[in-house]
Amino acid sequence: VLRRLDHVGFAAADLAAAVALFREVLGGRPGPVFEDPLQRVRVCFVEHPGGRVEIVAPLGDASPIASVLAAGGGAYHLCYEADDLDAEGERLRGAGFVPVGAPCPAVAFGGRRIWFLFHPIARLIELVEAPAPTR
Amino acid sequence: VLRRLDHVGFAAADLAAAVALFREVLGGRPGPVFEDPLQRVRVCFVEHPGGRVEIVAPLGDASPIASVLAAGGGAYHLCYEADDLDAEGERLRGAGFVPVGAPCPAVAFGGRRIWFLFHPIARLIELVEAPAPTR
């Protein structure tokens, strides 16, 4: 099952400028900046009471968010935490979602895998696998 | 101050289809549908652990979300709760935000006022005034 809404993904050309705006003007609390060569993005989670926003900026050329930025940037995906990433991705496929690439590990989640899927109404949805239970 | 992230605004052409998708596939819990003739939208809040999504669909012609839907729909604004709507809106203006219209009451918030402002990096931001304290 999908346990919870983890974050809203938000595309910005300039990571530092966007993080400063969310911190200084919108009252958020930013965490560390992660660089993810596999995803070709730099990301920073900004925590607010009520939810968190993942600011995503390009890393190098051919970043997957280039098209989002060309359209102005801003909120562009919702991310849900899945107890079983592969099973939930397959369930979404059965409901009309189309995978955007394959599941892959994400630096911003300590190597936990993510999977992006697209649906004409839900638009771009990210799944992230839940942390392994501690023993 | 801005107290918290209240919701993510999400544009959909067909409110019922979008609400069904968020409920049945993404695990959310929808509330009632509100019709707002002033905003010219129909809205439904879908609650998830971790945050809530406001599904917004057009009501009649010339809905303000027509341009968002023409671009594909999906997440298009972030809403923050303000302790003092007018003061916070003015503060955002001083930080480079441009008001989109004037503050006005919103059906979905029981008549509490909202105010949309735009910034080239933060994009479309909605402020909603906090509920009056109960005595």
Image (cartoon, coloured by chain):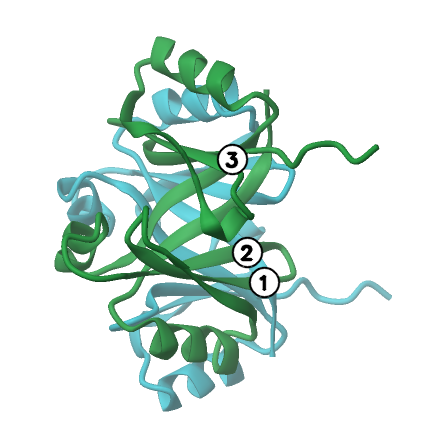
Chain colours: A cyan, B green
Report the residue at 55% width, 39% height from top: B5
Q: Secondary structure at mark 3?
A: strand
| Mark 3 or mark 1: whose residue is earlier in sequence | 1
Q: CA distance from mark 3 to mark 1?
A: 16 Å
Whether residues under marks 3 and 1 lie with C-beta atoms below 8 angstroms apart, the answer is no
- Tell me whether marks 3 and 2 sit on the same chain: yes
On the rendered structure, is B5 left or right of B36?
right
Is residue A34 found left or right of A83 in the rendered image? left
- Mark 2 belongs to which amino acid? Arg
Q: Quadrant of residue A77?
A: bottom left
Task: Identify the disc placed on residue B47.
Answer: 1
Chain name for mark 1:
B
- Compared to residue B9, the image places residue B131 above or below, namely above
Q: Secondary structure at mark 2?
A: strand
User: Given the current orientation, which residue lies at the most extreme bottom position?
Assistant: A94
Q: Are marks 2 and 1 in contact (CB under 8 Å)?
A: yes
Whether residue A45 is visible: no
Identify the mark at residue B111; answer none if there is no mark.
none
- Residue A94 % position (x, y): 38, 91
Identified at 16% across, 49% down, the residue is: A67
- Residue receiving disc 3: B80
Q: Is the residue at mark 3 from the same chain as the one at mark 1?
A: yes
CA gap between label 3 and label 2 equals 12 Å
Q: Is residue B1 left or right of residue A62?
A: right
Residue B103: image quadrant is top left
Closer to the N terminus: mark 3 or mark 2? 2
Q: Would you place residue B39 above or below residue B29 in this image?
A: above
Query: Which comes sooner in the sequence, label 2 or label 1?
Result: 1
Question: The residue marked by circle 2 belongs to what chain?
Answer: B
Question: What amino acid type is highlighted by mark number 3?
Answer: Tyr
Q: Which residue is mark 2?
A: B52
Whole-percent x and y of residue A24? 50, 16
